[in-house]
Image: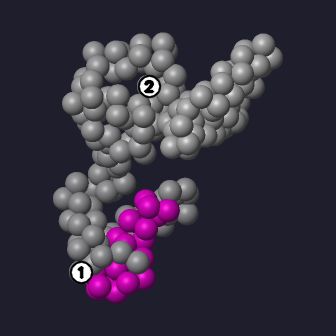
Amino acid sequence: MKDFLSLEQRKDLRRMHKKERSRRNADRIKAILLLDSGWTHEQVAEVLLLDDQTIRNYEATYLSKGIEDLLSDNYTGCVAKLIPDQEEQLKERLRTHLYRTAKEIGEYVRETFRVSYTPEGMVHTLHRLGFIYKKTTPVPGKANPQAQQEFLAQYQHLKETKAHSDKTSLSMAFVLTTTLCLLTHG
């Protein structure tokens, strides 16, 4: 469609295009100006790296509703999966319990409210609810030398009194016990 804009409309659109900061809106204005210059929908789509049906939609919106509707962003996002009461329960739970990952929180939500979230979706929900992630700082426990000596004495006694086949499981228990003492974070 060629020459559907008046000279004044063309000037207004060019002025708007120069002032427009949003690339998305600038491309929409450009599409209308190029269509008015005689370009086809396919040519405009190729230049703007868009689908030709998108260009047709821009043109239809502009012609039927005007520039305001063409440039309006009516995106509202998705509806929250949890109802406000459930969100309050989740907030209270997060204030009283520590979780290391969004995945753990998502598992709690799934078990409690029967609502599934991906870890990324849970992160977005937590941000919307005003929570932020802070990496945990490992703090070494205070060793009790007397308790360590008692444990070693008990371990030695068990090692000496158990049969050879049980020594493997005792060694695994000792390795597991000492490995669990290493500092780590999620």
Q: Is residue 103 above or below residue 140?
A: below
The residue depicted at 24 percent of the width and 33 percent of the height is: 115
Q: Are marks 2 and 1 in contact (CB under 8 Å)?
A: no
Q: Residues within 10 Å of mark 2 (few under 14, many from 20)?
A: few
Amino acid beneath label 1: Met
Instruction: Give the CA distance from mark 2 to mark 1.
Output: 49 Å
Q: Is residue 175 magenta?
A: no
The residue depicted at 72 percent of the width and 25 percent of the height is: 152
- What residue range appears in magenta? 23-48
Q: Work out whether residue 141 or residue 167 is closer to the camera in this orientation and state it.
A: 167
Residue receiving disc 2: 129
Q: Is residue 115 left or right of residue 19?
A: left
Residue receiving disc 1: 1
Q: Is residue 25 visible?
A: yes
Q: Is residue 4 visible?
A: no
Taking the view exactly as shown, the residue that stands out farthest to the right is 145
